[in-house]
Image (cartoon, rainbow, N blue to C red):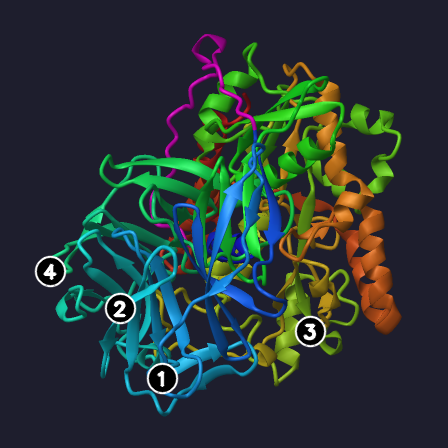
Amino acid sequence: MKHKRTAAMLLAVMLLLTLCACGNGAAPDVTPAPEPSAESAETLSYSEPYVVSLSFAYPFDGGWRLNRMARIDNRLLLGASQNGNFRLALTDFTLSEDGEPSFSTLRDLSVPDLTGRGMPFISCVTAGEDGCFYAVSSELPKTYFSADEGFCTNDAYSGEHVICRYSSSGELLGTVELHGWDKGAINAMAVSSEGKIILYSVDFVELYSNAEQKRCISLLSPDGSIIAASQVFDDSVRSLKAVGSSFYAVLNSAMLFAGKFVSIDASTAELSELSFSGVTASFAPLNIICADAGGEWIVMSDMDFFGIDPAAGTAEKLFSINELTTGDISFDAIAHLGEGLYAAVGNDEGLMLLRRSAIDYSGRQLVKVAICDAEYQAMPLIRAINAADSEYYYLVATPTKKQLKMQLVSGEAPDLLLFSSSYEDTASDRINLESNVFDDLYPYLDADTELDRMSFLPNFLDGLTTNGELHSLYNSCMIYSLSALERYVGDGKNLSLDDYRRIVKENSELQAMFPSWMTKSNLLGWLCSTCLNDFTDYSSGSCDFDNERFKALLEWCNEMLPDYEGEALPESYPSYSEDEALLHLKMYQNRLSLENTYYPVCVGFPGSAGNGGYYYCSNSLGMAIPAAGENKDGAWNFVRSQLRLDAQLRLDDYDGLPVNMEAMQRSIDAIAVSDPAQAARITELLTGISAVVSGSDAALRETILDCAKAYFNGDRGLDETAALIQDRMSLYMAERYGW
């Protein structure tokens, strides 16, 4: 499972929802935030960011993909596939005094072939609580996925499966045949200490035809007769586990990115929801099967693995994917080999060996790091620098924003703050990056031997500067602009709102200013996200919305399509295709997107300075150095390590664009080889950007939208609306900002 990729997808969804949000009619809470007090500051606990090392063992000959695993004591049952053939084999492992594993030669197991068509499909394996290994040998499902051929069908499917029971040494003890099985492909199995069998099955034919999604859990007696079956459900089983005579599972909804723990009644197969202290069943895209017999139930929650004790109702964090210092990996099953060593199978031929261990920090200076809302971005970088740096080591705390605000004015301030989306939370928890509780970073830059003020994208530092000081930096960005075709807007420079109106009127093929998704509130939401800083001053807690410039933007928004309620467009709602609209949202999110020449002319956002494009950093890693921190050199060492050319070139497609100009220039030069015109457009766009948006106060935006609603509905005039917004925002800004 590509965890980094999944997180980035979720962030992209949340970003669109945030920027296009409509007001809900509620005024923001303007209760004054408590003043920071050194006396009320809590002492933060800084923990050692362990590192998970990754190595591989290759039990099978080359070309066999490991995809099944179960463990009993020091023995592993492994399943593998190659070009439609399947193998099932045992290996013993031993651990040396320093915890290093060694594996015995594989012993292939006999698997009955019910169909007479060659090696059967091994659909799942498990370690039973009765001390035996189990494997399900099946026909290929009615519908299945092949890495070579994509989705395939098996028209000869007849519902034949056999459950094979093996001793822990690999002797075939018996089989249970299932004939005419009509509940779909068997994806997971668990066997209790009493020999009862739980099977999880999915009817992929119905699943992928958008019919009723048949997923169910069947309870079988040791002889294979069905005792009971659960109701058909829509969630997927991510983990299935027997503990003694009891059964448990993790159910997960990919649509809701959430899930639940359940117990499964060993007589009726009824599901009952459970909770475990310290962990939620959050989104994990693939099945993560615990391969252990006895011992802990290993489950995955988002990016963290936990060992759960179902009887006690507790969960202990074992390790995190973020603790890996290298690579994205996928998991199908995991087992605990002992001494903090875990074995996993996934998308590789090898058996993945994961070991969580500490780093020797002797002789290195401590740097205390506070991370707010940025663990998934920051922790891999912290672990990487801890593994490589010889002068400093970085310990981590994850305070709430309220806790952090207390720390910043106390004698317990961290040396370094790493954050994300610091302006998106409620204003009472907002970290005021413009305040003097953070160091000005310009002196650090000016003294650096490798970085200087010219190392960054044009105007990037200026956009982050307040009163001549630079209190934060970001390791990446995106670029947002409105765009159009050249035949309508020429070079796109110096176009007014009246120009856009005129262009639509003069070109009969254009039906609207924007495609149909752009309603009045949507457009105002975008404009608030891009140019709120033009009308607000967070450092003084003041604002100015009652002016002709802001009124003109409100008027322009009022010309858009009407707002609509609900998820679906009303039947009477006008529908304009992309090519029937003048303006489009342009998002340069990574190096690949820089090559995008659809609607190539960027015209920016009206009301903003410069060319109206802007750097968007809300989902980037923010870095700031608290004034009260002790290890300034160590803090800057981390900041500069993320802004140097080598680190900026390592940003992948899910991290955003580099903010280091040399790294960006290399991407532009690569584009210029095949498309010099696009390279020139990107260069010109960068040169004219003058704003950096690192998020926005959601309460500010929603209140503006709420005030504008009556104007959009025709119930309030333009001047009255601007005055109302100014009145409400003045009170809000004065009471929320400026500490």
Disc 1 secondary structure class: loop
Dot 1 or dot 4: first in sequence order is 1
> As drawn, is 603 to the left or to the right of 67?
right
Q: Amino acid at mark 2?
A: Gly
Inter-mark Cα distance, 3 to 2:
63 Å
Q: Is residue 594 above or below residue 630?
A: below
Dot 1 or dot 3: first in sequence order is 1
Q: Amino acid at mark 4?
A: Thr
- Res 174 label: 2
Mark 1, other Cα within 10 Å: few <14 / some 14–19 / many ≥20: some
Q: Is residue 616 above or below residue 471?
A: below
- Res 142 label: 1
Q: Which residue is mark 4?
A: 268
Q: Is the residue under label 2 in contact with that under label 1 (CB below 8 Å)? A: no
Viewer-proximal residue, 726 or 138?
Answer: 138
Where does the magenta region start and end? 21-48
Inter-mark Cα distance, 1 to 3:
41 Å
> Which residue is rendered at x = 37% and y = 79% of the image?
208
